Every structure is written in C-alpha cells, then in structure tokens.
Amino acid sequence: MGPKTSGGGRGGSTSFDVASARRKGASPAANGRSDAIHQKRTKLHAARNVPAQPADAALKDGELDLQAFIAAREFEIKSLEQSMATSKAVSTSRAFQKVPRGLRRRTASHNPKRVPRRLRARAKKEMAEDNTPVVEPRRRKPRTTKARIRAETAKRIGLLAARKRREKLKQAADLSRDGKAAEITGVVGRKPRPKIRRNQLNEPPKPHAKFRRRQINKTWLPTHLWHAKRARMTEPKDPLWRFAVPLTPNEKIYRPTHRSQGERGTMIWDMSYMTTIGLYGNAAGIERVLKRVGILEESCWNERGRRWRLGTRTWCGMLSKSVGDSRRQMCPATVLWNPQTPESSDGEDSKRKQRQIFLRVHPSAFLELFNELLRLTKMENPRLYIEDLRFEIGSIELTGRKGEVGDGLACDFELLFGLSKAQHEEPTPSDAVVAEGDAMDIDRDEPLASRSDIGTHPLKLLRHISKATFDGLIASPMTSMDTPNATMNVKISLVARGVVSTCARIYRLPSMPSRVASSATAEVPSTLPPNNPHAVALPHDLRNQWLALADIQSSKRLQGSKRPWPTDMEARKRRLAGELIKQHIPYPLEPPNLRHVGGHPLVPDADDLIGFVTAGSYCLTDGRGAAMGSIAASKVLADVRDNKKEGRLCIVRNAGENVGWLARWDVL
C-alpha cells in the first residue's frame, strides 16, 4: 500500500487562466515572469507538502494491525522531518543575499570571497551544489591588450621587488655572520610638508605615486577612497570646483539617510571642499578689514560680540565689497576667531596683540574673496597677511539628533537645581564595601555600607509632583514648597512657528527690571542695577518683546473685525480729537535684532532656565510644534501665582541653536 498525498495544490493554473491570458495578449516578458513565479510557488508548495497515509491502512479485517500501524506512523514522522528540511532549504535565501543591502555587489554570486567570512563556507557549498562557476580574478586571463600589458607590468614589478627583498636579506645575513652592524647612511624620516606661502595661492599637495595620474586636474577629498566605492563621483575630466566630489549614493533608496538625519543617529558629510582663508595680524587691523568686507553689525564689536571675538562663537552672513558709492555682495561666509583666553580684554594691549581669524567660503567664490582680502591687507600698516588653506584644513559636517557633541548639550538637571556633580563618588576597589544592589555582592561576607557612606547620585534627590499638588500650591499663596528639587511633567505647545527636539532648553519669560522707590526730586524713573554683571547684554524690554509675539498671534485672529464708528456725536468728537493729537511715527521702526538673529528676540540666560524637553515633534492635529518635558516647579510657581496667563508662557530653544520659540506649558 503506497503512501498518498494529503491536501491539494493551490498554486496550479487552470486551462481557463491560460486561455484568458492568451486572449489578453500578454507580452513574452510578462509570460516569462509569470512562469517563473508559478514554478517558484509550485516548488515551495511541493516542499511544504507532507505525505501521509489514511487511517484505514492499519486495519485488517476490522482489526488493528500493529505492524502496519507502526510502519504508517514511522512513515509520517520521516515525511514530516523531510518536509521540514526541504521547506527550510527552499524558503531560505542564498548566502550572498544575506549580505546587507549596502554591501551587495553584482559579483557576489560568483565569487565567494566577496561575502563576509561567516558566509563563505555556506556560499562555497551552495555554489558546489548548483555547479556555479567560481570566479578568481588572480587566475583570470586578460582579454584585451591593455589588460595584458598591465598584467605583465605588475608581474615584472613583483619580480623586481622580490629580487630586491632577497638582496637585502642576504646583505643583512652576511653582516650578522661577520659580526658587523648595518651602517646607517643618514637620518630616515618623513618627507617635509611644503611651506604655506603668504599672500599667494598654494598648490595642492603632491599625491602618492600610485594615484598621481588620477589627480592631474583635480584633488581628492580625504574620504575619496571610501566614497568612490559607495557613491557616484564627478566625471574624471569634469571635476566640481577642482575637487572630486560625491554626487549621489549608489543606494536606490534614501530612507536610511532620512532616518539618520531626522530621527536616529547622525549623518556625516565631508565638507573638505569648502575653502578656508587665514587672516593674521593685529586685532585692530583685522577689525578694519572685516568691516570693509561687510561685517558692520554693532553686535559683533560691542559687548554682545565678546564671545565671538574670543573664539567660542561663529559669525555667519553675507560678505560684500565696495563698488563706487555702493556695496555689492560677494558670498556667504562663516568667520571664526582663533580661540583666546577669557582673561584677554579688548583694550590697547589686545589691539597690538597678534590674532588669527579664519574665513570659510564656498569654493566658487574663493578667488574673488581672496583677491579682495589681498587688496585690503596691503592697505594696512602694520601689514597683515593672508594664507590659502584650501588643502590644509578639512571639515566634516554632522547633522541629526545625535550630531551634537560636547558638554552642555544634554539635559543637565544638576545645573538646573544647583546640585554638585562631584557629590557622587564611586567606591575604590580597595574598600571592603560594595554599593547596594551591585550584582557582584552575592558571595561577599562583608556587611553592605549605607547610602550615606558611599554617596548619593544628585539625580536621585529629585522628586516628582502631580498636577493636583501643583494646583493646590497655586490656590494657597501662603503655602511654600517642602521639596526644593521638585519636577513636574508638562506638555508644551508652541504659540507660532518652530519645532523643538529632544534636549531642548525651556526658559521662563525674563523678569522686568525692578524700580526704585519714587522720589520728589527724581525727574525720570530709574531702575536698580542688575546683580549679575553679564546681564547688561540683554535688553531691558526683553520680556515685552516676547509678550508682543503672543499679542501678534492673538491680533491675527481679530484682524478681520474692525472697531465700529460710534453713532453718538460726542463720542465721534472725542475719537477724532484723539486721532488728531496722536503722535504719529514718521517712519516704521526696525524690529529688534533684525540683523543679528533675523528679528527674533534674544533667549534669556541661564538664570531663567526652568527645564528640558524629553520629546518633541510637529503635531499634525494642532498644526504646530508640540513637545513633552520636565520643569522645575519652584521656578515657575511665583510667576503663575502673579499672572496665570503670562506665568505659563515659556521660551524653548533647541540645543546648539541661538533662536528661541514662544510656547505655552500645561501640567500633565
């Protein structure tokens, strides 16, 4: 009694399907693809089919035949195991298909060495089973004259190198046999780098002899070898700005790029093709030259620009030059001073002191700016000089959420609450105590030390309060907070534009300057001097500037409705008189900070920092940016008690940026 197959095939095509396909006039290519898909489905169905025997096979004259029953079950078990193995072999992909998409090559299916080492044994086995020809480039015979000459030259060079190597080994063996040390003919060191010429254009560095002919009319970036295997480069005889620049990746999809730049990780881009010009000399001469090329903002040369002149900030803007009685823009640039110690001042000594400044511009505008700076430096006394640093300074641009490095770009709650970071000390290995909860304290016989002995992490001192607790503190003005390090979770809704990200800073509105007691002899109201000497950099009406943004958004909603003209004659006369005596502005005033940060009000300092953003994005439901964060309850309680509307307004600034956005917070 032979085994019977259980179940019917689902992938087979009927004669009606074939006839309908013929009537539709399918193309031969489409028929070929459909046949391949049909064969693949049939093969997969046959591999997953498990042969079985019917139950009546074990019955003989109405009685159970024990030998037939055991043989039938044995057959089914073997069929199941064979079907599992066959189905696994059919459904799985080949070894070269296991390689990540970014590392796949067209020759990987014929060369097992093109796959990772963990898959080479499997690739060789699959190729042996399928009789796939193995490609070995070293044994391939050249087919063209150029390839044959190249192969012969490489063989000849290899023979000469091997002969020279054998001669050196023989000489060393002879000297060691005679007991003499090898003579040193001279000092062996690296080749000296060419000196950078002042006030002249520099030549590109001399490349390696192996790649010299490929860089006759262009220069490679430091990451050229990496990009050449993974991106489409510029044409060899048509470089971009005299550099071999990668244009597009070889990948057919851009999803990993968008993910790394927007949500995950960091995207790195080689910006070494951007040119750099160095300007050296006394600080006073450099200031005059920079003003002549368009850096005329007062904020760059007063107290507000002190950090920029110290080298901790960069200036980005348009450079220009004077043409007759007008000025013509040249190019956008980034200007960075060589960092200087904060103890240095802007007095007479600093004017005589030598400073360095770097200007980074696009390579298409390099020659025009270089010639303009060369003309301006020749007019200075003492003389300034410039250097062409195109081939000396490289740069890499990092974009993404994790692209910001360094201290101060994370959620620093220790700074927010004034906690000491050095309060937590790790126990040394010589101590006989182990921190509580350590995974290695199971087999120790020594008693565990208390938390007060080994120190407590500052973040463990923070306490969370609920919305009900905060509402109770607002309702009772005489009640004070028992816990100074109290935080609460808030939802942040931006009032106008802007999108915030993780680790963004949350500031409260800056307070108004406090007034002194009125006096009969005082002619103008005065204010108390600020306690912080650095607070003078912020304008006195900074709070009003931020509140004006909230008033602008509310006024836009009522823009269509105008105040009706009164019907009473006396009311009309009063309104007409008010408009006549009203002081008219002869010209529209310029918004504050229009030339510095595009008209945005300045962000408050660290004294008004109240919390950090934990997650933020654009909310499609509200049509504006939204975020979640944690703020210090003690820093906003007094403002909310004074004014519930203005007390819940805040300023959100992304880490690494200098522009803030007005928002409103609500306790969750």
Image: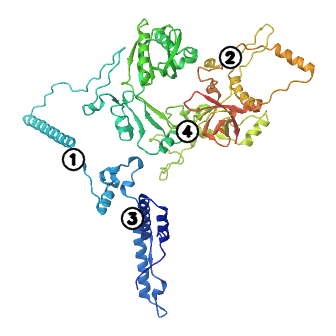
Query: Nearer the N terminus, badge 1 or badge 2?
Result: 1
Which residue is identified by label 4? Answer: 455
Which residue is identified by label 2? Answer: 589
Q: Nearer the viewer, mark 4 or mark 3?
A: 3
Q: Is residue 492 left or right of residue 305?
A: right
Q: Quadrant of the C terminus?
A: top right
Q: Residue at x 43, y 82 (%)?
A: 72
- Where in the figure is residue 508, as x and y percent of width and height? 67, 30
Around disc 1, counting alpha carbons within 10 Å, would you say few (fewer than 14), some (14 to 19), or many (20 or more)?
few
Which residue is identified by label 3? Answer: 89
Find out whether the residues at labels 1 and 4 contact each other: C-beta distance under 8 Å: no
- Res. 32 mark: none
Query: Nearer the N terminus, badge 3 or badge 1?
Result: 3
Which residue is identified by label 1? Answer: 143
Query: Nearer the N terminus, badge 1 or badge 4?
Result: 1
Q: Nearer the viewer, mark 3 or mark 1?
A: 1
Q: Quadrant of residue 251?
A: top left
Q: Nearer the viewer, residue 62 or 580?
A: 580
Question: Alpha-carbon distance for marks 2 and 4?
Answer: 57 Å
Around disc 4, counting alpha carbons within 10 Å, would you say few (fewer than 14), some (14 to 19), or many (20 or more)?
some
**Can you see residue 342?**
no
Find out whether the residues at labels 1 and 2 contact each other: C-beta distance under 8 Å: no
Question: Alpha-carbon distance for marks 1 and 2?
Answer: 78 Å
Q: Nearer the viewer, mark 1 or mark 4?
A: 1
Residue farthest toward the top in the current orientation of the protein: 381
Q: Nearer the viewer, mark 2 or mark 3?
A: 2
Around disc 3, counting alpha carbons within 10 Å, would you say few (fewer than 14), some (14 to 19), or many (20 or more)?
few
Q: Quadrant of residue 296?
A: top right
Query: Nearer the N terminus, badge 2 or badge 3?
Result: 3
Q: Residue type at mark 1: give it.
A: Arg
Q: Residue type at mark 2: give it.
A: Leu
